[in-house]
Image (cartoon, helix red, strand yellow):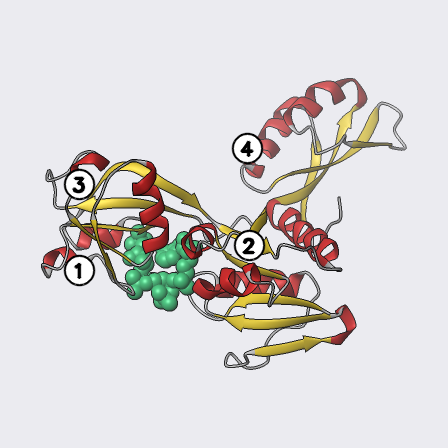
Amino acid sequence: MLRIAVPNKGSLAETASDMLQEAGYVGRRDPKDLHVIDPQNEVEFFYLRPKDIATYVGSGALDVGITGRDLLLDARMPGAREIESLGFGGSTFRFAGPPGRFSTVGDLEGQRVATAYPGLVDAFLDEHGVAVDLVPLDGAVESAVRLGVADAVADVVSTGTTLKQAGLEIFGPVLLESEAVLIAAPTEADGTDTLLRRLRGVMVARRYVLIDYDLPAHLVDEAVKVAPGIESPTISPLRDPEWVAVRVMSPRKGVNQVMDALYKIGARAILVTAIHNARL
Ligand SMILES: Nc1ncnc2c1ncn2[C@@H]1O[C@H](COP(=O)(O)OP(=O)(O)OP(=O)(O)O)[C@@H](O)[C@H]1O
Ligand SMILES: O=P(O)(O)OC[C@H]1O[C@H](OP(=O)(O)OP(=O)(O)O)[C@H](O)[C@@H]1O
Ligand SMILES: [Mg+2]
C-alpha cells in the first residue's frame, strides 16, 4: 500500500481531495476522517495538517504527500523532495511593513520580523546575510506590526487584500513562488509512478479541452498554426473531398479566442468538449 499524506484543512485541502477523487481514488466520507484505506487502488490516505506533511514524508513515515512548496521549504526536511507541481494553491511569499519604512531586505537588519514560516524566512535571510529578530507566530501575522510585536512581517500573499487591510506594503525581493506540490520520501515507494501519472492526467483534463471542427482541406496548415495541439492534430476525411475534420487538444484558457480565429480562417461546426481524464 502506498501511504499518501493529504491536507486535512486549509487552502490546499479541497482541491487536493478533488484531484485525488478525479484520479479515481476513494475520498473521505466524513470531513473529520483522519485515515482512509482504498484497497482497490492499493493506497492509504492520511489527512494531516499541511504544515506537518513534509515532516511525515521526509522522515519516511509516509511515502508521498501533497503540500505547499513554501511549507516544504519551511519544514527543512532534507529527505522530502518535490516531484511534481500540481497547478493549484499558488501564492508568493513576501516581506511587508509600514508604508515607506523599508525598501530592501538589508533594511531588516536588527529588526523584528513576524512570520508563520520561520524556517523559510531564516534560510532566506541567512542566504542574504541579514540578521533579524524572528518572531514566530501561528497565523494572522499581518496584525503583528499594528500590535507592536514586530516591525515587519513575512507572509503568504495571494490577492494582497489582507496586507492592504492591515495597512502594510510589500517591499524587497520575492522570497518564493509557491504552489501545491507532490513530495516524496527519500526512497521511492512502489505505486508512486501510478499516482503521479494519474495526477498528471487530472491536470491535463483540467487544463485542456478538445476542439473539433470542419475545414476546407487547403486551409489546414493555417488552422493548425492557431491550434497546434500537444503532439499533432488528428485530420480525418469528410464525405465532401474538399473538406476535412480536425480534432485537437487546446488549453482551456483562451479557447474562445482560438475558436474566433479558427472561424475567421474558415472553420465551421467548431465544437469544444471537456476532457474527463487523460494519460499522455
Ligand atoms: N490565500 C492563501 N492563504 C493562505 N495560504 C495560501 C493561500 N493561497 C495559497 N496558499 C497556500 O496554502 C498553503 C497554506 O495552507 P495552510 O492550510 O497551512 O494555511 P491556511 O490556508 O492559511 O489555513 P489555516 O486557516 O489553517 O491557516 C501554503 O502552501 C500557501 O502558499
Ligand atoms: O493576499 P490574500 O489574498 O489576502 O491572502 C493571504 C492571506 O491569507 C492567509 O491568511 P488566512 O486567512 O489563512 O489566516 P492565517 O494567517 O491565520 O493563516 C495568509 O496567511 C495571508 O494572511
Ligand atoms: Mg492561514
For residue 125, what is the image quadrant?
top left
Q: Callout 4, which amino acid?
A: Gln
- Mark 2: which secondary structure? loop
Q: Callout 3, which amino acid?
A: Glu
Q: Quadrant of the N terminus?
A: bottom right
User: Looking at the picture, does residue 248 appear above or below residue 30?
Assistant: above
Decide: few, some or many residues near mark 2? Use Cα within 10 Å; few <14, some 14-19, many ≥20: many
Residue that numbered label 3 is attached to: 109
Q: Quadrant of ligand 1?
A: bottom left
User: Looking at the picture, does residue 160 appear above or below residue 140?
Assistant: above
**Whether label 2 touches label 3, CB < 8 Å:** no
**Whether label 3 touches label 1, CB < 8 Å:** no
Numbered disc in front, either 2 or 4? 2
Label whose residue precedes the other's in the sequence (3 or 4): 3
Q: Callout 1, which amino acid?
A: Ser
The location of residue 96, given as percent across then percent down, is 21, 45
Which residue is found at the position 32% from the left and 55% from the top? Answer: 118
Label whose residue precedes the other's in the sequence (2 or 3): 2
Residue that numbered label 1 is attached to: 143
Comparing 44 with 73, the one in front is: 73
Q: Is mark 3 within 8 Å of ligand 2?
A: no
Decide: few, some or many residues near mark 3? Use Cα within 10 Å; few <14, some 14-19, many ≥20: some
Decide: few, some or many residues near mark 1? Use Cα within 10 Å; few <14, some 14-19, many ≥20: some
The location of residue 180, given as percent across then percent down, is 50, 53
Label whose residue precedes the other's in the sequence (2 or 4): 2
Label whose residue precedes the other's in the sequence (1 or 2): 2
Residue that numbered label 4 is attached to: 257
